[in-house]
Amino acid sequence: MKRRSLLASAAAAPLLALGKPALAAEKVLTVGAAVFPDSLRAGTGSFASLSLMTQTNDPLILRDNTSGLHPGLATKWEQIDPLTMRFHLRQGVKFSDGTDFTADDVVFTINFALDPQNAYAMVARINQIESATAVDKYTVDIKTKAVFPTLLRGLSDIIIEPKAYVEKVGANGFTAKPMGTGPFIFQKWVPGDHYTLTANKNYWGGAPKVDKIIIRTIPDGSTRVAALVAGEAHIIEEVPIDLIDQVNASDAKIDEIGTTAGLVLTFDPTIKPFDNARIREAFDLAIDKELILKQILKGHGELLQGQVLTKGVLGFDPGLKARPFDPEKARQMLKEAGYDFSTPVPITTQNGKYVSDTDICQAIAGMLNKIGVKATVNIVEGGVFQQMNNALKFGPMYMVGWYSLGDADFATVWYTRAGRRTNWNSPEYDKMFVAARSTNDEKERVKLYHEMAALAYRENPSIFLFGLPSIYAVDKKVKGFGAAADKVLRLSQVELGK
Amino acid sequence: MILGYILRRLAFLPLTLLLVAFATFIVLRLTGNPVDIFLDINRTPEQVAALTKRLHLDEPIPIQFLIFLGDLLRGDFGESLQFSNSASAVVWGRVGATLQLAGTALGLAVLLGVLGGIVCAVWRDRAADAVISSIAVAGQSMPSFWLGMLLIEFFALQMRWLPTSGYGEPRHLVLPAVTLATILLPNFVLITRTSILELMSEQFVVTGRSKGLSRRRVLFTHVLPNAVNPVLSFLGVQVGTLMAGSIITETIYAWPGVGRLLISSIFNRDVPVVEAAVFFIATAIALANLTVDVLQMLIDPRIRRA
């Protein structure tokens, strides 16, 4: 008996082995996400949401990991008059339900985004659009209300939705089960847990190299790293800086890129004595940014060079340099200004919003104490911060990260009256900002941004601190993944080796 | 008689829930205009107007509260601001995970806690008592996020027996349940120990012993049944602690429960979801306490008569 069963299993073994490869070959890529949106609703303002939506749906213009722009569902585009851009669409592309992608879908999506009823937050990126019209099946004209140099960049945040499908299932139906032209196809969404997608073998950009992706939310940084080390996740987002060594000691490596977020300490010049630009400058001189970068950020990220923009962004001025650390001079300047800092100066910040945010503020407060300023740290919850923001009542100083997303327009707007983020008011700055926004001439725009940066450097509406890093950890089996400046997961060309 | 009691208690339930509703409502309004917090700086005046109207914030506060109560009676908390789905559906979607975690943790804490307490009481001031009591005190003073990290480090990374985090299979439940149970377990050990020791010096125990009953017989037939009630009433109180503890545990282990949902909704001031989640938790605690009280009555005739 025993012998026979052994023989039987020996005979069955090759059969099993034959049956197995098909199963074993299924390549499942698992990603541990730090921030997980609560639904698959298109157009919510967050990049965590865009990161999930772009798995199933493509924008007209694709953005890469370093903020470069490339043809997406539009293959080329031309300016036909200063207010109109003509887009030629990619032909032969199908949505994953088999319907053709055409100009109607583009017009539908843009109209949907522009309709205030739909509360499409990302509309802020394209709000200068007047209308979108289909010229023929594969051509769309987009008219803008004014000259709109950031139209293409704005469109890279707007995913194209399938008109017929959304009209059939409704906006909520689309949220429950998104469908598009993207590299992956919706399979299962469990709120607060995971999102599973299968590969779209017919993807116009080339079939994905894995069969399935699972994007899991792991909100806690240490657990995320543990999941990576245990092999439960192949890629994780937002590695806490103090756990980088643990990742390096495992079978994974760190993949890091600078984001376009500039962390700045902004003053309220309506509060005395911060109306005095010399005092703001003295504060800047008193902060040893190199030391904070080295000790708290462990060298991750970059030192902002006397401007809000990070290196490589359109409008970045390579001629400007960060003010050197000079506490002696700072003390001297405060003395000359004749102001007595016996009243405390609170620095408002959120906790955990940016890498090491409270630690950075504590260090800064300590450095300011050394020049005789009673600086304290005022940590507020996100909702309260948002409210202070809307009321523009942050107290004398607050720390915030401002993203430029590759174009100076998006970050410099916060220093204008219209941006409503600071009480600093410079009509000259505002004028240059509007001028830079009103021309499509890139050279002219860059020149204006350099002048604006020089003005801000003289006036110090903010102390410019650091360009924040985006730090991923990636299993060594994974190939073709890149850390993204905008924190959007680009997985279509990621391979999973042995 | 018991039925009457249950009905009377149930009649008070709406009052409890009304107070909860009132407190939630007031706190959410006191911490700022939800519209200001939910919509970011890029909002348009149209969006502000639409959301203000949707949340009835254009009405005077008392009217707002009445509208809120009216919706509540119909079980309608409104549509979630961030999920484009009804708030109660969003919360219901997460209830299962929380009940699974909290239920397992509570079961574990009661079972091990009571056993530990019995051992401590029986071998009072001996080695077993010293060891278990000190572990209980140590466990009580250990922050659960730290314990969670230790458990992940040992069981998931060193031994590779269990997954670090996640949801779906029974093995995912082990570490979160143990972490959450550890918050409660020491208290159950100490409560059981104390109440048994107190009972041991009661007259009926002395009588039993002097009648010639064995120590074991006295313990199992006279002392333990009487010790059930203090443990039960403590259990009722602990449901709240359990809910609070589950928020941290769910975050550490990426467990998709109500606790984490509540936190993210509070940060985003997703008013309908916060209200629905708080309401769910309050109802759960109230019902748990009611169940405990009823059980106590069933067990102890003295309470029934009182």
Image: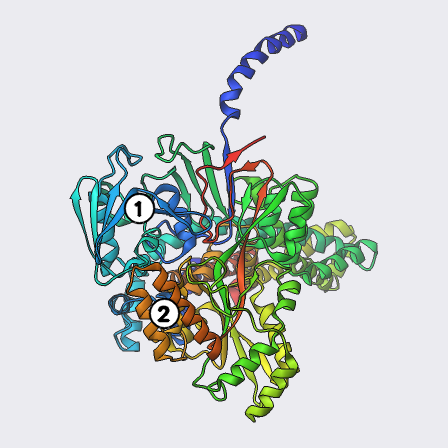
Colour logic: rainbow
Seen in the picture, residue A314 relative to A156 is either above or below; the reply is below
- Residue that protrudes farthest toward the right in the picture: B126
**Residue A365 location, x and y as percent?**
60, 77
Q: Residue at x 45, y 83 (%)?
A: A269
Question: Which residue is at 59% across, 81% downward?
Answer: A375
Apparent side of residue A301 relative to residue A433 in the rendered image (left or right): right
> Does the rendering let one see residue A495?
yes
Element type at marker 2? helix
Tell me the tag on residue A60: 1
**Residue A420: image x %, image y %?**
36, 74
> Is residue A376 shown above or below B75?
below
- What numbered label is drawn on residue B34? 2
Where residue A74 sits, quadrant-wise, is top left
- The chain that hosts pointer 1 is A
Q: Give the Cα separation between the discs numbered 1 and 2.
A: 34 Å
Q: Nearer the viewer, residue B162 or A473?
A: A473
Residue B23 in sight in this render: no
Question: Residue B265 versus residue B283: which sits nearer the camera?
Answer: B265
